[in-house]
Amino acid sequence: MTRRLLIALALLLASPALAVMPDEVLDDPALEARAREVSKELRCLVCQNQSIDDSNADLARDLRVLVRERLVAGDSNDQALEFIVDRYGDYVLLKPPVQANTLALWAGPAVIFLIAGGILLVRVRRKTPLSSAPPALTADEEARVLRALDPDRQERD
Amino acid sequence: MRKLLYFIPALIMAGLGAAFYLQLGKDASVVPSALIDRAAPEFALDPIEGHDRPGLASADFRGQVTVVNVFASWCLPCRAEHPLVMALAERDDIQVAGLNYKDKPEDARRWLAELGDPYDRIGADQTGRVGIDFGVYGVPETFVIDRNGVVRFKHVGPLTEEHVRKSILPAIEALQK
């Protein structure tokens, strides 16, 4: 039992393996933190759905080193990002920028929400139920239902 | 009028269907190049050590149409496309340049000796920095650069006969006019 508990504890404490190698890490912790932040926004083009911070690919490593170089050279985070985007295009950004050709992507959900909300509002105002309830039973039908549900009843009546 | 509303879902489905159909067959892993119609990056690379071809610099693009082929001896698909690059080199209206990406000089030399050297110039990009400037993310890649040093076309991955016929050659010919 203790053994299992220890294993569970060890697993909890284990941190995910990082792609960043010790020799890449900058001496200045503040700069390193910024480098990590920038790296998380950049797509590894070889694996495409990992950030360069997560990827073990060679190119990802080169880009991580490059980002650190730019930061050491005095670039702001945005300037370092721009440096990479300049070479690889918007596609390297994991979060697409808001601009003319991504307008549908960014505004789409809001537009759909507004349209759906508008329809709902009009519906509620009119008080028309979305699906009309079935018409009420006539007296005759009601008697038949009761008979079907309780066959003994007729005899008792 | 109200009845027409019932057609809206069908219309939306048809629209989506058309949009998906148009995307069908496109390779989603191909990243559009940021470099098209922009000047090639400034660089100057040394030749491959011990190999008798001059190095490559951005100044070499001036005055003639250049096909830049990014290759490496460790890259298997490069081997597959190599005969096509050799064939391109037979044209005398273009210059074929090589960007030897992250390769050891001795490996590159052996590779070229075995398969043939189609390149007029080869830059040895040992650190891969010029590759990054070119937006290279998968070797082999092939660029067509015009007389003014502007990148006009980029192909990612190994060339096939069809790529050469349908995109590389038309790109070259359009620039010769």
Image: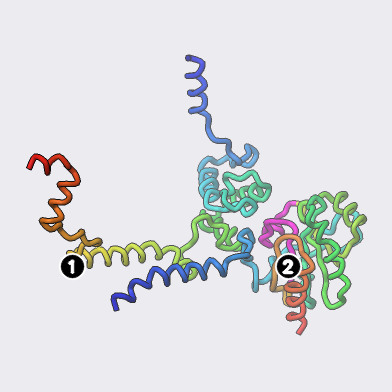
In-image side of A32 versus A144 (left or right): right
Q: Which labelled disc corresponds to residue B143?
A: 2
**Secondary structure state at the residue bearing disc 1:** helix
Q: Which residue is mark 1?
A: A126
Q: Nearer the viewer, residue B140 or B99?
A: B140
Residue A30 image position (x, y, % from top left)? 51, 43
Residue type at mark 2? Answer: Phe
Residue A24 image position (x, y, % from top left)? 63, 42
| Disc number lying in front (1 or 2) | 1
Q: Residue drawn at (29%, 75%), measured in percent from left and top?
A: B2
Residue type at mark 1? Answer: Arg
Local crowd size for mark 1, using a 10 Å CA cut-off: few (<14), some (14–19), many (≥20) = few
Residue A7 image position (x, y, % from top left)? 52, 21
Tell me where residue B72 sits by quadrant. Answer: bottom right
Q: Quadrant of the N terminus of chain B?
A: bottom left
Q: Chain of mark 1?
A: A
Local crowd size for mark 2, using a 10 Å CA cut-off: few (<14), some (14–19), many (≥20) = many
Query: Which residues are the magenta region?
Result: B127-144
Residue A122 image position (x, y, % from top left)? 22, 67
Disc 1 + disc 2, Cβ < 8 Å:
no
Q: CA distance from mark 1 to mark 2?
A: 63 Å
Q: Nearer the viewer, residue B15 or A29?
A: B15
- Residue reaching furthest to the top: A2
- Residue reaching furthest to the front: A155
Q: Nearer the viewer, residue A137 or A5?
A: A137
